[in-house]
Image (tube, helix red, strand yellow):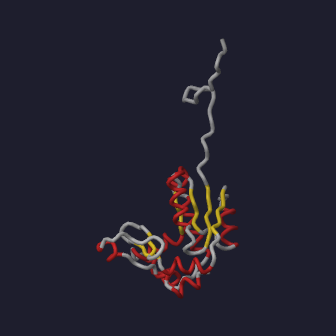
Amino acid sequence: MMQVLRRPTAGPDSLVQEDPTPPPKIVIMGGPGCGKGSVSRAIIEKFGVVHISVGDILREHIANETEFGSQVEHYVCEGRLIPDELAINIVRERLERPDVKEKGYILDNFPRTGDQAEAILDMGIIPEKFLFIDVTELTLFERCRGRLTDPETGIIYHDRFAPPPDDPVIIARLVTREDDMEEATVSRR
């Protein structure tokens, strides 16, 4: 009779301890409207990582009318990048939170400059995966121009590619982000 050897399970009294799988560390990059949000949502759903987007954090501060929000609002409205030091501090603070240490992260369009890349390396942050979504300029422009956001749910629709439901309540509250206006969209590239 053949004997099947089973791997011992690691428990508190076991002599065998397995290293837990480290949480995922992912960076996703691409132009505005390329689909980073959609891909990020799929990754979050599959792996349970924390989504870290400097843009989302800035927009949240602006919407909540915080002091920091008022300092950065003109950058966002004009589609300009905030100074590296501010972006680095936002990411550093978010990466230090317990949920990120436990679950891992997906950094959305960060780092965007050489100084930001050097800063995360200096912090010991080394992503394991890097995703770049390459979309033509014309496609990016079309996607941004028709993008509509539901501020209540955070769901993003598009007037042509992913229309909102035919619900007058939802349609009434949809907004176009200021950084998706034509002038800002062009300057963000």
The answer, for residue 14, to whether it is visible in the render is: yes
Identify the residue at the far bottom of this view: 183
Q: In the displayed structure, would residue 69 be above or below residue 38? A: below
Identify the residue at the far left of this view: 169
The answer, for residue 82, to whether it is visible in the render is: no
Q: Is residue 165 left or right of residue 71?
A: left
Q: In the displayed structure, would residue 45 be above or below residue 155? A: above
**Residue at horizontal 63 percent and vertical 26 percent from the top:** 7
Residue 66 image point, x, y percent:
42, 75
Q: In the displayed structure, would residue 95 be above or below residue 174? A: above
Quarter of the image with the C terminus in it:
bottom right
Q: Is residue 69 left or right of residue 15?
A: left
Residue 124 image point, x, y percent:
67, 58
**Residue at horizontal 31 percent and vertical 71 percent from the top:** 167
Residue 27 image point, x, y percent:
62, 62
**Residue at horizontal 64 percent and vertical 19 percent from the top:** 4
